[in-house]
Image (cartoon, rainbow, N blue to C red):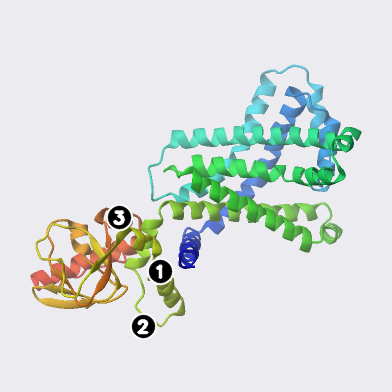
Amino acid sequence: MHRKRNVFLVSLQRLYITWESFVGNDLFTFASAGAYSFLLSALPIVLMVLLILVRVLHTSPEAIQTLISENGFETATGTLSKYIEPMLAFRTVGIFEMIIGITVFWMARRFFASIQRGMRMIYRKQGKKKPIKENLIVIAAEVVLVILIVLMTIFLIAGNAFFNTVLSANLLSPVLFRLFRNLFRFVPFGIIFVFLFLVYFATPSLRPRKKHSVQASAACTISFFIVQIAFSAFVDLSRYNLVYGILGNLIVIMLEVYIFFLLFLFFAQFQYVVQFFETFLLAQLYLLPAYDDPKIRRQLERIMFIRPPVFYLRYAVTKKKGELIYSMDDTSTELYYVWNGAVRIMMPNQVTDYSRGRIFGEFSGIVGGNRTSTAIALTDVTLLKIPARLFRATIEIDGAMSRRALRLITDYIRKSNRMPLSIDFDV
C-alpha cells in the first residue's frame, strides 16, 4: 500500500509540474500554430501520398476512393478524382513536374517545422541548437510520415478487400471475423503511435530514454483515441452539416487537430519533466512555500512536494540529536533538506534553527570552497543529502532558483561586510 501511494504521489507530482511548465511555456499558442500549419500542409501531404500510390505503386484509384468513403472522409475532403486523374494523365516526368514535386514537398514542411518549434520550446534550456541537424530531421520526418501513410493505406485497402471476400468468412469463425474486423480499425492509431515515438525520441536536443518516449507516445495516442470516441458520442455532425454545409466536417476536423496538438505538446512536456525530474523536484523543494502561506494553491504545493519519495530513496540520511552534520571550514558541498526533525545552523554572528521542509548548506554548493557555518542535529533528524552538481544544474535552468541563490550570496556578503548592498533581481 505504501509503495502504491508513493507511485501515485510521484505521478501526481510529474503531472502537476508538466501542467505548470505547459502553461509557462505558452504551449497553447504553439498548438494553435501547429493546427494552422497542418491545414496548410495537409493537401501537399495528401498529394504526395496519392502520387506514390497511383504512379509508383499502381494502386487502383477506385480502391483509394472506396477506402476514403468507407472511413467517412468523403464529405470533409470531397472527391479525390480531380487529383487522381491528372496524375494518371502524364506519362513522363519532366523538369516542370520535378519542380512541382519539390514545391509540394517544401510546402508540406510547415507541419513538421511547427512540431519542431514546439519541441524546441520545451527543450530550450537543455542542449545546443544545431540548425543543420534540425532541418535534416524536418525533412526526414516528412519522408517518414509519407511512408507511414502509404503503408497504412495499402494495409487498409488490402484488409478491406480481404474482409469483403467470401474467403475471409470461410477462414474465420463469425467471432474471430468480428474481432479482427474491429481490431483492423485501430491501424491508423498504430501509425500515429509509431510517428509520435519517432518525433519524441529523435527531435529533442538531448536524446531521452526509449522507455520515456514509448510511454509519452502511448499516452498521447490513447488520449487522442478517447477524444475521438467523445466526439463520436457527443458531436452531431449532421447538425453541423445542416448549418455549415461541407465546412461542418472541416470545423470538427480542425478542432480535433488542435486537440491532437495540445495532447502532443502536453506529453512532450511530460517526457521532458520525466527526463529531468530530479531538477524539477529540487526546484520545488528549494522554493517550497512556508507552512503559513495564505494562498490555497501554495499550500497544496507544499502538501504535494514536502515529502518527495524519489529523493528519499536516493539521498536520505539520519542523524542523532547533537550529532555534527558538518562544521565550519569543511570542504563538503552537498546541500541538505530537512525531511523530519530540526537542525541548528551556527555562523559567527548568527544562529538559526531549521525544521521540516527547509534547505540549508547550499552556499558551498553555489560558490565552492569551505563551509561558512556549522550544522548540528537539534533533534533526531532525517535529512536528504543532495549532491551539489544537481543543485547547480537546477540553478542553470530555473530562473526563480537562480534569483533566490543570488539573494543568498548577497545576504552573505552584506552580513560579512556589514554594509548595505542593493541589487535589483527583477531586471
Q: For the image shown, how many numbered marks are present on the structure?
A: 3
From the viewer's perspective, tell me whether residue 303 is left or right of residue 323: right
Residue 119 screen position, x and y as percent:
50, 48
**CA gap, disc 3 and disc 2:** 28 Å
At which x and y percent is residue 365? 21, 58
Picture disc at residue 292: 2
> Which residue position is annotated with label 3?
390
Q: Which mark is residue 217?
A: none
| Residue assigned mark 1 | 305
Extreme residue in the front direction: 1
Name the residue at 54% across, 50% down. Answer: 215
| Pair 1/2: label in front | 1
Determine the residue positioned at 38% across, 42% down.
128
Which amino acid, by three-letter code, is at mark 3? Leu
Tell me the crowding category of disc 3: few under 14, some 14 to 19, or many 20 or more residues within 10 angstroms, Cα based: some
Look at the numbered disc 2 and give the secondary structure of its residue: loop
158 left or right, relative to 26: right
Q: Earlier in the sequence, mark 3 or mark 1?
A: 1
Secondary structure at badge 3 equals helix
Residue 278 vs 301, above or below: the answer is: above
